[in-house]
């Protein structure tokens, strides 16, 4: 299964990604982890990313896409993956489609985790991180909605929306049920 996981900050993407990748037997590929790995290993892509990170600028798409392309070529991702944090824009989604198309595959589903803003704000405030003030968290929610709306429209044909409120096991069950239904429709 080839999946993309989307959801606002605080929806539980990291938690669900870990559980779902294990249950589905596919690697969880986080762009944050890819950045850290490339920067630590001082790869050419990592050195290029570091130049932008050092100045507080966004890492350009060609660097992020290069890291994702390389990671998806790994033997453990040959039969599936769960992408977390990529794509973030329609331009990146088109790049992902091209990468998969060149390999003769396509996404099976885009799993969107949803939760009311007040719920995710409370979750994030509960983490107790110094940069997690309510104003900052609500701003991140607005940015997410603004940036992600076009992406959700782009993926409407393979989009599965899952209610991310409740115990982790219930959210996982909803996601797996949705993915099972999607496989039946695709087959």
Image (spheres, rainbow, N blue to C red):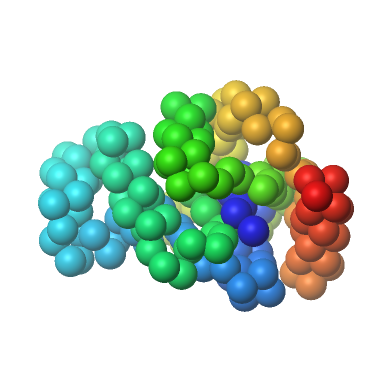
Quadrant showing the N terminus: bottom right
Q: In front: 45, or 75?
A: 75
Give coordinates of residue 39: x percent, y percent.
20, 59
Labels in figure, total: 0
Asked where in the image residue 124 lies, by quadrant, the reply is: bottom right
Q: In front: 166, or 95?
A: 95
Relative placement, left or right, of 37 versus 84 is: left
Instruction: Spot the residue most to the front.
Output: 104
* Residue depicted at 61% across the width and 45% down the height: 107
* Residue depicted at 19% across the width and 53% down the height: 46
Give coordinates of residue 169: x percent, y percent.
79, 72
Q: Is residue 142 above or below residue 113?
A: above
* Residue depicted at 49% across the width and 62% down the height: 78
Q: In front: 69, or 61?
A: 69
Q: Can residue 16 be seen from the camera position used here?
A: yes
Give coordinates of residue 140: x percent, y percent.
52, 39
Q: Can residue 87 be seen from the camera position used here?
A: no
Q: Is residue 140 above or below residue 79?
A: above
* Residue depicted at 45% across the width and 35% down the height: 98
Relative placement, left or right, of 69 versus 53 is: right
Give coordinates of residue 60: x percent, y percent.
28, 34
Q: In front: 8, or 66?
A: 66
Relative placement, left or right, of 17 versus 91 is: right
């Amino acid at each position: 299964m080839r999946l993309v996981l989307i959801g606002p900050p605080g929806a539980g993407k990291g938690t669900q990604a870990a559980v779902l990748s294990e249950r589905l037997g596919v690697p969880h590929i986080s762009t944050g982890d890819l950045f850290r790995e490339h920067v630590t290993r001082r790869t050419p892509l990592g050195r290029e990313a570091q130049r932008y990170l050092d100045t507080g600028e966004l890492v350009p798409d060609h660097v992020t896409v290069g890291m994702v392309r390389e990671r998806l070529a790994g033997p453990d991702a040959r039969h599936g993956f769960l992408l977390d944090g990529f794509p973030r824009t329609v331009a990146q989604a088109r790049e992902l489609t091209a990468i998969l198309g060149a390999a003769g595959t396509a996404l099976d589903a885009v799993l969107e985790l949803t939760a009311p803003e007040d719920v995710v704000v409370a979750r994030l405030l509960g983490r107790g991180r110094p940069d997690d003030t309510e104003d900052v968290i609500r701003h991140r929610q607005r940015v997410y909605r603004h940036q992600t709306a076009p992406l959700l429209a782009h993926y409407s044909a393979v989009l599965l929306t899952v209610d991310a409120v409740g115990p982790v096991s219930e959210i996982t069950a909803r996601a797996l049920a949705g993915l099972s239904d999607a496989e039946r429709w695709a087959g």
